[in-house]
Image (tube, helix red, strand yellow):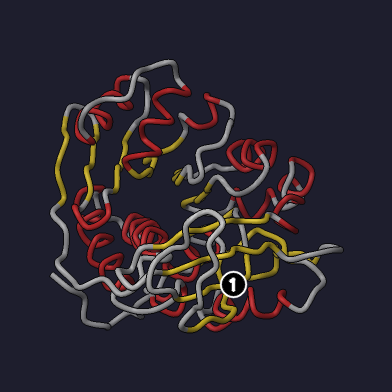
Amino acid sequence: MSAIAVVGSINADLFVLVERHPLPGETLIGADGGVSAGGKGANQAVAAARLGSDVRMVGAVGSDAYADTALEHLRAAGVDLSAVTAEPGATGLAVITVSDDGENTIIVVPGANASLDDARVTASADPIAAADIVLLQGEIPASGFSAAVRAATGRVVVNLAPVVPVDRDDLLRADPLVVNEHEAGLVLTMFGAAPAESEERMAARLIELGFASVVVTRGARGAVVAEGNQVVAIPPAIVESVDSTGAGDAFVGALVHRLAAGDELVPAARFAGRVGAFAATRRGAQTSYPHAGDALPE
């Protein structure tokens, strides 16, 4: 039985390091750049697998030069890629700028990820049904998202990033829903509720709307966990950020790793915060993720 099935995006990340982000119409000279593996689904799969989880990826790459790059760290981490297909056309691509203060901007072109529709995901229903945890994001078509939820027999964890229109009943299967503070407000709006003044209140409102549990991440300020009547603030691990690219995905991958191991949500989120902080101290997304046994910040 596969502990975790990740149904999500696989990208190549085209990144540029800059002193600051350019203004509209402005051209800047970058300090460095390159191409590395990315995609929220792949990032989270690599993060969980490096920590020791049994992970299967359900996804797609294109038939171009970026495909091997996009799969490099998934293979190295031991992720099962038997449900990853090669589609005609381009691999998903993310264009990323990273400034000296560690902040980033990201533009994503779906490419082959757009092929993960109802039919394609239904064709992988068996490995999804066999998983203890099914992990989803917002970078695949809504019909594929719904097909994955239908196929899931275990726990469903949703990192709805980006916030895209998906079936509400399917989204309410999330246990937990993982979003950042901006995304939490968008999900509340999606359900016809007004965003709240604090992450704690937004998490509580999402519980009131019917979610079993919610994690609201807030970067360097830690996270908030809501479950039942309990709302707990998770303090951040203190580090000097070098590159925040993929740190949120490291958090989600670490969270499901610990949930699959049997942790309750609050201790799992505490551990995930330390993993996300570790990732922010290194350049890149998947290349920055810790392996089991690496010393994590407190």
Q: Residue drawn 27% across and 29% down?
A: 202
Residue 1 visible in the displayed image: no
Q: Which residue sits furthest right?
A: 88
Image height check: is 288 above or below 276?
A: below
Mark 1 highlights which residue? 14
In this rendered view, identify the residue nearer to me: 118 or 260. 118
Instruction: Locate the N terminus and report the quarter of the image it occupies.
Output: bottom right
Task: Tell me the SS state at disc 1.
Answer: strand
In this rendered view, identify the residue nearer to me: 97 or 118. 97
Q: Position of residue 116 (x, y in %)?
A: 72, 49
Image height check: is 89 above or below 158?
A: below
Q: Which residue sits furthest top?
A: 192
Image quadrant assignment for residue 80: bottom right
Residue 269 visible in the displayed image: yes
How many numbered circles does the render carry? Answer: 1
Q: Residue drawn 26% across and 25% down?
A: 196
Q: Is residue 222 left or right of residue 174?
A: left
Q: Is residue 1 left or right of residue 184?
A: right
In this rendered view, identify the residue nearer to me: 36 or 265. 36
Q: Position of residue 250 (x, y in %)?
A: 38, 64
Dot 1: within a 10 Å radius of its alpha carbon, few (fewer than 14), some, or many (20 or more) residues?
Answer: some
Image height check: is 143 above or below 255?
A: above
Q: Is residue 137 left or right of residue 260?
A: right
Instruction: Locate the C terminus and report the quarter of the image it occupies.
Output: bottom left
Q: Position of residue 257 (x, y in %)?
A: 37, 62
Residue type, numbered disc 1 = Leu
Q: Is residue 132 left or right of residue 221?
A: right
Image quadrant assignment for residue 211: top left
Q: Position of residue 260 (x, y in %)?
A: 38, 57
Q: Residue drawn 30% across and 43% down?
A: 215
